[in-house]
Amino acid sequence: MRKVLFFHVGSIGDTIVVMPAMHAVMEYLKDARIDLFNAALIEGHVHQELYKHLNWFSRMNFTPTTGNVLQRTLTRCKIIRYIYEGHYDTVFYFAYAPRKIDFLLFSLLGIRNVYCCLDQTRKGIPIYRNYLETVANYGFRASQPFQFIFTEQEQKSAEELLQRLKIPADRIPIAVGIGGKKESCRWPVEKYRQVLCHDFKPHLLYPIFLGGGKDRADAESLIRSTGYGFFLQDAPDLSLRESIAFLKFCRFYLGNDTGSIHMAAAAGIPCIGIYSSIASRRLWFPFGDENLILRTEIACEECGRNLCKYGYPSRCIDAISVEMVVNAVKTFLKRYGTSPVREE
């Protein structure tokens, strides 16, 4: 039996965008034993739940690659041990920025079949499409597109939260992602306040805020300003997959380039993305053909910096005006404002 390792670097958003390509490869490895090693970019590994119910892997390991030099060295030792004990003959390497040390490790451990599943020479396409097209060029082309399927219990949990919120019938629920790991990708909260307090009559908004614990104060402040809303983290019993299932009840997503926008795309709702210009155009665009991504052109674009050298907010994202976002919301309200709340 072939022993195959999927080696992935990333967290929630990175996992969502890679899953269609993983699914495509899976179709051709039905007789192999497949394991997953995930080098997480943040502490914790909530994103492991995205694989729940899929039964893709014989075993999975999620190891944060954060910390000081000693911690990172210990992590590298864990990676070596995990791969050595697996006796793999094939590795599928899924990472946005391939690391030479990983390929050196594969070579030293005698793994000769290594597929780098992202073509770094291809520009101007979303990363999820790059993954799909790269594995297709290796001969792994999906017969059916990948879709997130939720269990009856997951859908029930999402529906129960919707009922508890008692969103007024005249209010339109939208998902709002105000957070993000990278400071340069965070649109100012005060600008979100101006958008959410804008008079969109006859439409009235009910924002569902997405984010982590550090976004709580901002979310609560925006809820006070608008008079309505809910911070999704205040439903602690809701799992990550159940949170995505809940997003189906939102008409659309408005927010930063972070894991939240990919969660919304996984739920199948259209997205208004407010993007910095630190990465190449379209690289981190989410799934879907109905999305509207706001991004500016600027001399210092594609800098790759987590912190803008000119300070916060980064020049490129601050160039996106409140008026631009208000107009985008008006466009989406015209398209989706009268559609029924999804209850599939």
Image: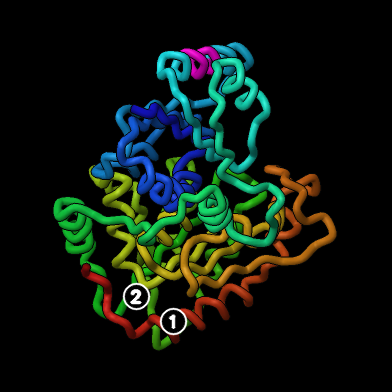
Front-most of residues 13 and 253? 13
Q: Is residue 217 visible?
A: no
> In the rendered view, does 24 fall on the left or right side of 65?
left
Which residue is the site of mark 1?
333
Quadrant location of the N terminus? top left
The residue shown at (52%, 69%) is 272
Rate crowding at label 2 as few (under 14), some (14 to 19) or many (20 or more) other CA atoms within 10 Å: many
Which residue is the site of mark 2?
172
Amino acid identity at mark 1: Leu
Sequence-wise, the earlier of marks 2 and 1 is: 2
Q: Are marks 2 and 1 in contact (CB under 8 Å)?
A: yes
Residue 250 position, x and y percent, is: 34, 68
Where 281 falls versus 243 (above or below)?
below
Amino acid identity at mark 2: Ile
Residue 46 position, x and y percent, is: 37, 37
Q: Is residue 121 visible?
A: yes
By what rule are the colours in the image chosen? rainbow
Start-end of magenta stretch = 75-81
Residue 80 part of the magenta-drawn span = yes
Front-most of residues 145 and 307? 145
Q: Quadrant of residue 213?
A: top left
